[in-house]
Amino acid sequence: MRYNLPPPDPATRIAPSFGRRVAFAFGGLAVVVLRALTAPWRARHARRRGVDAPVFLYEPYGMGDVLALQPLVLAYLDAGRRVVLAAKPAWREIVPPRPGFTFAPVSPVYTAYDPARKYQGFLRGAWSLARALRPHAAGADGIDVRGDVRSLAILYLAGCGRVRTLPRYFTANDCRVMPFAAHVVPLRRDVSRRLVNAAFAPPGATLGRPTLRHLMPAGGVISDPRRVGLVPLTPWAGKRWPPERWRELARRLQAAGRIPVVLCGPGETAEALAATGFAAGEIECREAEGVRRWVPLLAKCGAVVSVNTGPMHLADALGRPLVVIEGSSRLPLWAPEGERAFVVHPDGAPDRLKAIPVPDFIKEKCL
């Protein structure tokens, strides 16, 4: 992976608002109390499970987050442990079917990208969610890879025995996990996903990169070097590239004999065309209904240009030549790890994303 600017500083941290820091602190105190109150009940469940206790991973949000956890899940399965992954139903197929693996769906009510809906859903339904997960989680070894007090509350209410987490919320300095809220794993400062996985992995485990072989159609997919996938949509408006930039890129690709193809999720054709500045019929646009459809569409492309979104991580796992038009985040935690990936960051404030031109390195990677 390369950057148009020096790589993110390993000391970089998320800077949450004052209100979120206060909420996190009070939430942390509540989790300490919850851990103490539920300890006898959770210990009984753990004794019943004994050495057969599974590893319970809770990751209720994005496609890329679940894909990044796949090597950790496989490492525990290879070590002879049973594993339960609780995640959004749409991401069920990301982990290949294996003996000892169970997928526990988490209702989309708790996976909204809108912060207001996400917090409201948690406050209104945490107990219901925990009860739904309890048959899988009770007595299990819980893992929260976010350092998120909401996740810790769910794991305790679901009955997990020993719970491990990060020392701070996604490495945000001002959102440290309260002492005694959970077992905190050591974590280095350069917070790539691989290092986060390594912090939670079983002793002696070898962590590979995510694999998508199980999602490829029978017979595989023949890549067309002329096709360049354009992925313009992301749930975060501040990370989108302006339509005029996408349109300019597509025109350059067409002039060079390439075939730009807009790729989007189900029912998003109109939004994706608007995001790239094209009308219907002006450019090929393909909808991907689920992860299993995304994989062959991306694999058929000779290269991919994408904003920071879930399909970007799929393209990276497939080893496609990849250019990522990044938004405000410069944490390596969300960066692709492939050697054929190139990340573009705005030079300065996040609103400078709109000023990123169509640079020569896109020509180098995609033409």
Image (cartoon, rainbow, N blue to C red):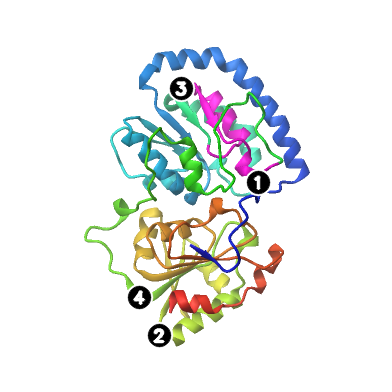
- In space, the residues marked 1 and 2 are separated at their CA atoms by 43 Å
Instruction: Look at the numbered disc 1 and give the secondary structure of its residue.
Output: helix
Q: Is residue 288 above or below residue 162?
A: below
Q: Which residue is mark 1?
A: 115
- Chain part drawn in magenta: 145-173
Disc 3 + disc 4, Cβ < 8 Å: no
The one of 218 and 65 positioned closer to us in this rendering: 65
Judge depth for marks 3 and 4 and give the one in front. Answer: 4
Instruction: Look at the numbered disc 3 and give the secondary structure of its residue.
Output: loop
On residue 225, the disc is 4
**Which mark sits nearer the N-terminus, 3 or 2?**
3
On residue 257, the disc is 2
Q: Is residue 305 left or right of residue 8?
A: left
The one of 81 and 66 positioned closer to us in this rendering: 81
Q: Is residue 33 left or right of residue 40?
A: right
On residue 138, the disc is 3
